[in-house]
Image: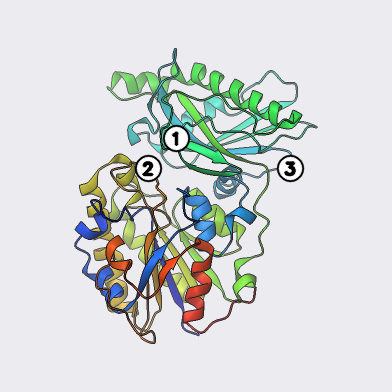
């Protein structure tokens, strides 16, 4: 069979009818894929859900998150190289943040986005092994990339629960899936149990004790004293979200589709999902903030994987962070650099969209007006010489609305639909 390059532009999508970075960007190579392919829009989980990346990525790789998703914490733990005693320990995705230490009002959820990974590691060391009041309890904290971290809690001989809410007010929890809060509180939230069980109450109590002790420890840490002297925000709090106690109970993706899958993964969440699905993973250095520096390594990794895998999933973080920051010009630049430094050379040298079937989409929309993920459907394009193109000429929200792919109502329908276009029937 022909191979498939599956390119995901993290957060590149916006809202149809409003200012669009995809429309504003000069991206002749991506637009050429739209012109020679079939286009549409995809709800990466389902209508009305403003998804986090992990649930959305699981979905667009063919797994219904309402059936398989078990929380972001375990996924990021695996991606960060932490083990998890499934059914006993609880893992959280965490952000270092800046708060007023007295009122716990959040000043910045991401410490101004200038917390270095080295600084974060020092702060994580100060919290790792924290003593909590419950006998036999323990905490493991590992910094990952920038302001991001993973927190794992446990109690010897007892089970904890994933049925607890987030302390990060930016995300509401619906069952185990977190969605962007439309009107988030400005304060560090108390962790509350989502069910009336001893395990959930105990887990919430531990999370709250950890959160308050973390503020006390971090606020006076030398890293933060130095940051204050330099006029930078202190990383004096930890925001917890997406508790989980087990990994998604999924069959390997190669067994599901009868194809060899590989992934170019930048961030712990994508690395974790790739490992859980038993994909062949080409890890690349975390994003540096300079796409001119980062993209060549992603291009090289994709080409390596194409030599040994049938489907190569490439997840590029670039456009998402400017969306969260409300920086429209930076988001446009990120899309243009991906077009110039990744898509263009693959078209010219690898037959992207002609000899090499190519699927392009986003994992979610991160419009600058919202500064958060929204429930908007995302542009989607499938290009290959054997597929008759539609009339769409530009890869953006309004143009793709008119494409032959139509509206894909649930993200986990997308990959089977594309494989069907290529004449491949999934095995499961």
What percent of the width, then of the height, locates residue 103? Answer: 44, 14
Q: Nearer the viewer, residue 95 or 298?
A: 95
The answer for how far apart the CA atoms under marks 1 and 2 are is 9 Å
For mark 2, give the secondary structure.
Answer: loop
Q: Is residue 120 left or right of residue 246?
A: left
What percent of the width, then of the height, locates residue 176? Answer: 60, 44
Query: Which residue in the protein does label 2 denote?
Result: 372
Query: Which residue in the protein does label 3 denote?
Result: 87
What percent of the width, then of the height, locates residue 282? Answer: 48, 62
Q: Is residue 48 above or below residue 191?
A: below
Image quarter in which the C terminus is found? bottom right
Question: Which of marks 1 and 3 precedes in the sequence?
Answer: 3
> Colour scheme in the image?
rainbow
Q: Is residue 306 above or below residue 94?
A: below
Q: Is residue 297 left or right of residue 157?
A: left
Number of labels in the image equals 3
Question: Which of marks 2 and 1 precedes in the sequence?
Answer: 1
Query: Which residue in the protein does label 1 denote?
Result: 170
Which residue is depicted at the point 51% across and 79% down? Answer: 420
Counting other residues with Cα less than 10 Å from the Cα at mark 1, is it few (<14), some (14-19), or many (20 or more)? Answer: many
């Amino acid at each position: 069979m022909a191979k498939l390059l599956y390119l995901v532009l993290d957060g590149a999508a916006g809202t149809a009818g409003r200012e669009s970075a995809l429309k504003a960007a000069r991206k002749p190579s991506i637009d050429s894929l739209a012109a020679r392919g079939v286009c549409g829009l995809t709800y990466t989980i389902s209508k009305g859900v403003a998804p986090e990346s992990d649930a959305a990525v699981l979905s667009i790789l063919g797994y219904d998150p309402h059936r398989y998703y078990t929380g972001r914490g375990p996924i990021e733990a695996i991606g960060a190289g932490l083990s998890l005693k499934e059914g006993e320990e609880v893992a959280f995705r965490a952000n270092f943040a800046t708060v007023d230490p007295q009122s716990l009002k959040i000043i910045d959820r991401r410490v101004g986005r200038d917390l270095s990974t080295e600084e974060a590691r020092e702060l994580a060391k100060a919290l790792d092994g924290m003593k909590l009041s419950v006998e036999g309890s323990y905490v493991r904290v590992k910094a990952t990339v920038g302001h991001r971290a993973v927190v794992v809690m446990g109690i010897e001989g007892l089970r904890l629960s994933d049925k607890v809410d987030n302390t990060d007010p930016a995300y509401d929890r619906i069952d185990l899936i977190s969605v962007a809060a439309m009107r988030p509180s400005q304060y560090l939230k108390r962790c509350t149990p989502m069910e009336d069980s001893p395990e959930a109450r105990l887990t919430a109590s531990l999370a709250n004790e950890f959160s308050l002790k973390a503020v006390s420890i971090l606020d006076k840490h030398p890293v933060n004293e130095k940051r204050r002297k330099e006029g930078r925000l202190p990383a004096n709090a930890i925001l917890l979200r997406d508790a989980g106690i087990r990994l998604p109970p999924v069959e390997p993706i190669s067994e599901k589709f009868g194809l060899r899958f590989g992934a170019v993964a930048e961030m712990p969440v994508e690395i974790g999902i790739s490992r859980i699905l038993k994909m062949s993973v080409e890890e690349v250095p975390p994003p540096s903030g300079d796409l001119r520096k980062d993209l060549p390594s992603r291009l090289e990794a994709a080409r390596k994987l194409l030599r040994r895998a049938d489907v190569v999933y490439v997840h590029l973080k670039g456009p998402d962070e400017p969306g969260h920051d409300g920086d429209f010009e930076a988001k446009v630049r990120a899309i243009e650099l991906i077009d110039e430094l990744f898509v263009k050379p693959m078209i010219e040298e690898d037959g992207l969209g002609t000899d090499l079937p190519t699927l392009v989409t986003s994992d979610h929309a991160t419009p600058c007006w919202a500064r958060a993920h929204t429930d908007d459907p995302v542009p989607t394009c499938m290009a290959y010489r054997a597929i008759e193109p539609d009339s769409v000429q530009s890869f953006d929200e309004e143009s793709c609305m008119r494409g032959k792919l139509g509206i894909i109502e649930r993200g986990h329908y997308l990959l089977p639909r594309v494989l069907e276009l290529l004449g491949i029937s999934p095995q499961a």
